């Protein structure tokens, strides 16, 4: 950490806190409350609230932060007003949703999670941070670190999927990528772990719906990625819109003050979500705005995003003695601390350098970095008869409106990304092949609808070519905020189109685009090759062509289970056992459906390569370990195919007997290995008793002595090696 950052050395931290003390003493109560107020610039990322004149509000010392301010010039103008026209000149903090890139876009977060590659993910977050910071943004509302277990939920696309460990590793990587180790550096911004907490559990996958989960699910599944982000030093946390045990997250003293600020010693600040303090009234836990303000400040939620609840109510609440001014001071201290950490008091204009912006935004290095992570995010779901890679074809049909769209590949939460910067699938294929003819047929529109003409044209084109690359899936606006779906199959008539193309006898490669797992039983049964490409961002088409033609080996693995049908949802690999497990039950009396199997279509961790790997020689360092003693796990992996390939070795455990039922499998470690044909590599992992901890029946997070199975393999449903060990007290 650089000086003036979170130094371990108390000598260095005191000057900051001293300056904050001094400033707090000079600010009036009204000015302090102004620091807790965030107003909107131009772009609306939520329903309209109260209309005010932003510049007047800043001039009157009533604004601490602005989100969605458009363009460097506007940001600089607002900053000048705050610094030069208010009594104490406290600089503003500019926030923006830089979720998977600013202008150069990486894959959507769910897609990027499929890379299982924290280094690549860190690098992609760093590109986003460099471009945002060069454009006058100090603070991104990312990373989203919610765990998503219901594919109907449109915001699954913002998450790292269903597993708390993978989500935690990627949360830490993104925080590192956004914040670096010096927030004053030119390529860093303040990060925000959101949405705290358990938003991914909205009932029936319906956006903004209620959440009703146990404390153990909260602690074991939803909190670990937030804790990982806090451990990595994330500067801010955003409240979820949803409730935990009937209390809106921003009003939950337990979540915010007790767990986040006390248990985890988080010293940054907590921002509401868009108008979410006012929504306490609609939830029915606050009678009016005054109640809402009181609940939020007591809970420890520090900044009010666009709601005007704090500016309308906090002064009165302090003056009539309802709340202690110390609560306001603590919230303001946290906001000011962030501004100091960003170096804003030293130079409030350091982020407004147009030359730097021009050199940084969309530069070639950034494009290369996002192409790299995009390639790594592609999952080869199926590859019968080795249809892929396409190394011996004279003609290729490219079909589907999505294949010709440089818009959809950007996905939702696209920041300042623009279609004109992006490479569509068709462009990528055309730019890659030298010796084959490429013919395009639209086949269906973006919503999947097929007309007789489109259908005929597509059939004819496919009949005349050696292979058909058909882009199918969702247009980008079908996932994201407020974009839940009750059905998660291929929209429109895309399946009928595929059936007709498949009937031509030309091999079909389905290139999927989607922001959530889809239910694709027909596709999976009938189409020989399926490539999951999510929405891969600016370099999508090039990255897809890299994998289609074998210039890059597919190495992505699913971060979320793909169900057989929507009826299986929520489905996740790390479920608890039941009292009537299917495999033990007499026919008819096990946990099951009458009409569908229990297993997903594609399991968590699934993903193929153009080669095959063999696992051997599992060796545990000991058969018994004591608390806090590490256990080493050794094995070898060999590439037994003819081409180079990347394997993701996955380590799962199962705690056989616990004070609460334990998941049938839990991911604890993973490693990506690139192996030459015939190459064999030794791999060693180490786990500790902390890795075995969970929310026990005694309501503590701890490991319990007993037997554990270790399962190592290629996917959660493809375990190749097993052993067990005992943990002793
Ligand atoms: C609402 C979304 O829930 C949140 O993720 C986002 O950061 C804010 N709007 C600001 O755009």
Image (cartoon, grey):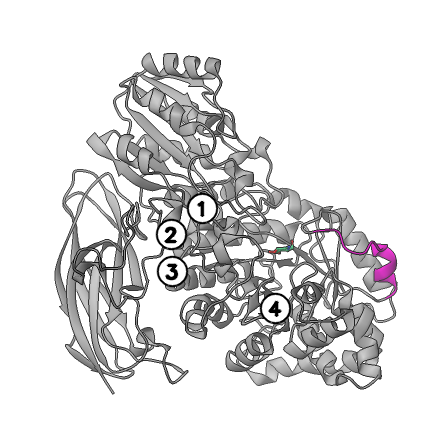
Task: Estimate the x, y position of residue 261 in percent, counting from the top left.
Answer: 57, 78
Q: From the Cβ of disc 1, is ligand 1 less than 8 Å away? A: no
Task: Estimate the x, y position of residue 391 in percent, counting from the top left.
Answer: 27, 26
Which mark is first along the chain, 1 or 4?
4
Q: Residue at x 68, y 51 (%)?
A: 46
Counting other residues with Cα less than 10 Å from the Cα at mark 3, is it few (<14), some (14-19), or many (20 or more)? Answer: many
Q: Which residue is mark 4?
A: 248
Nearer the observer: mark 4 or 3; the answer is: 4
Q: Is residue 495 above or below residue 194?
A: above
Q: CA distance from mark 4 to mark 3?
A: 24 Å
Q: Which residue is mark 1?
A: 516
Task: Estimate the x, y position of residue 198 in percent, counting from the top left.
Answer: 50, 64
Q: Which residues are magenta?
A: 47-60
Counting other residues with Cα less than 10 Å from the Cα at mark 1, is it few (<14), some (14-19), or many (20 or more)? Answer: many
Q: Is residue 410 above or below residue 660?
A: above
Q: For this rendering, which residue is in front, 555 or 286? A: 286
Horizontal arrangement in the rendering, residue 240 relative to residue 78 (left or right): left
Split into 4 quadrants, where in the image is the C terminus?
bottom left
Task: Estimate the x, y position of residue 653 in percent, counting from the top left.
Answer: 25, 67
Q: Is residue 548 above or below residue 93?
A: above
Toward the left, the furthest residue is 617
Q: Which residue is mark 3?
A: 163
Which mark is first along the chain, 3 or 4?
3
Secondary structure under tag 4 reads strand
Which mark is first along the chain, 1 or 3?
3
Verify CB contact (< 8 Å) between mark 3 and mark 1: no
């Amino acid at each position: 950490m650089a000086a003036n950052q979170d130094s371990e050395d108390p000598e260095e931290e005191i000057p900051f806190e001293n300056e904050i003390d001094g400033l707090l003493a000079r600010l009036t109560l009204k000015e302090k409350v102004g620091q807790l107020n965030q107003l909107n610039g131009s772009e609306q990322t939520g329903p309209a609230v109260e209309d005010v004149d932003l510049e007047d509000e800043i001039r009157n010392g009533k604004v601490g932060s602005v989100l969605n301010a458009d363009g460097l010039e506007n940001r600089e103008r607002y900053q000048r007003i705050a610094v030069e026209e208010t009594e104490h000149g406290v600089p503003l903090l500019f926030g923006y949703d830089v979720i998977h890139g600013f202008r150069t876009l990486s894959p959507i977060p769910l897609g990027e999670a499929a890379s299982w590659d924290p280094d690549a993910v860190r690098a992609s977050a760093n590109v986003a941070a460099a471009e945002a910071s060069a454009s006058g943004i100090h603070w991104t509302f990312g990373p989203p670190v919610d765990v998503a277990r219901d594919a109907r939920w449109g915001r699954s696309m913002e998450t790292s999927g269903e597993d708390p460990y993978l989500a935690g590793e990627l949360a830490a990587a993104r925080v590192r990528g956004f914040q670096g180790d010096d927030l004053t550096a030119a390529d860093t911004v303040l990060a925000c772990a959101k949405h705290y907490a358990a938003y991914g559990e909205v009932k029936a996958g319906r956006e903004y719906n209620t959440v009703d989960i146990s404390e153990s699910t909260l602690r074991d599944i939803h909190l670990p990625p937030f804790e990982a982000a806090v451990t990595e030093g994330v500067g801010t946390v955003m409240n979820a819109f949803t409730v935990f045990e009937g209390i809106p997250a921003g009003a939950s003293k337990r979540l915010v003050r007790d767990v986040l600020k006390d248990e985890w010693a988080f010293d940054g600040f907590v921002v509401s979500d868009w108008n979410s303090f006012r929504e306490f009234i609609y939830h029915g836990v606050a009678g009016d705005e005054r109640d809402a303000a009181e609940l939020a400040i007591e809970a420890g939620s520090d900044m009010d995003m666009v709601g005007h609840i704090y500016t309308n109510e906090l002064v009165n609440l302090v003056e009539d003695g309802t709340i202690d001014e110390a609560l306001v001071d603590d919230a303001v201290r946290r906001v000011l601390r962030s501004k100091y950490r960003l170096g804003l008091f030293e130079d409030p204009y350091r982020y407004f350098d147009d030359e730097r912006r021009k050199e940084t935004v969309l530069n070639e290095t950034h494009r290369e970095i996002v192409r790299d992570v995009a390639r790594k995010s592609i999952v080869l779901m199926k590859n019968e008869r080795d249809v892929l890679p396409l190394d011996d074809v004279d003609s290729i049909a490219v079909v589907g409106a999505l294949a010709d769209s440089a818009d959809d590949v950007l996905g939702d939460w696209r920041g300042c990304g623009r279609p004109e910067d992006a490479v569509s699938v068709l462009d990528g294929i055309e730019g890659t092949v030298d010796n084959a003819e490429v013919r395009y047929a639209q086949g269906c529109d973006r919503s999947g609808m097929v007309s007789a003409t489109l259908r005929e044209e597509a059939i004819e084109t496919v009949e005349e070519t050696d292979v058909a690359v058909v882009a199918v899936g969702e247009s980008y606006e079908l996932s994201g905020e407020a974009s839940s779906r009750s059905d998660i199959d291929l929209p429109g008539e895309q399946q009928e189109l595929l059936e007709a193309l498949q009937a031509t006898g030309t091999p079909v490669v389905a290139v999927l685009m989607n922001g959530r797992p889809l239910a694709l039983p027909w596709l999976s049964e009938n189409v020989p090759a399926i490539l999951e490409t999510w929405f891969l961002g600016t370099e999508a088409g090039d990255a897809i062509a890299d994998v289609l033609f074998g210039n890059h080996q597919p190495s992505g693995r699913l971060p979320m289970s793909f169900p057989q049908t929507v009826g299986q949802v929520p489905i996740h690999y790390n479920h608890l056992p039941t009292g009537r497990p299917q495999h033990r039950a007499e026919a008819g009396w096990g946990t099951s459906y009458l009409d569908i199997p229990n297993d997903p279509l594609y399991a968590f961790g699934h993903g193929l390569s153009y080669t095959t790997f063999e696992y051997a020689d599992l060796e545990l360092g000991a058969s018994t370990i004591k608390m806090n003693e590490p256990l080493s796990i050794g094995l070898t992996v060999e590439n037994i195919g003819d081409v180079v390939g990347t394997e993701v070795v996955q380590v799962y455990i199962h705690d056989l007997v616990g004070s609460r039922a334990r998941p049938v499998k839990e991911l604890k470690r993973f490693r990506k290995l690139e192996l030459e044909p015939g190459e064999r590599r030794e791999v060693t992992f180490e786990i500790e008793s902390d890795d075995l901890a969970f929310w026990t029946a005694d309501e503590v997070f701890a490991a319990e002595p007993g037997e554990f199975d270790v399962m190592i393999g290629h996917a959660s449903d493809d375990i190749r090696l097993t052993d067990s060990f005992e943990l002793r007290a």
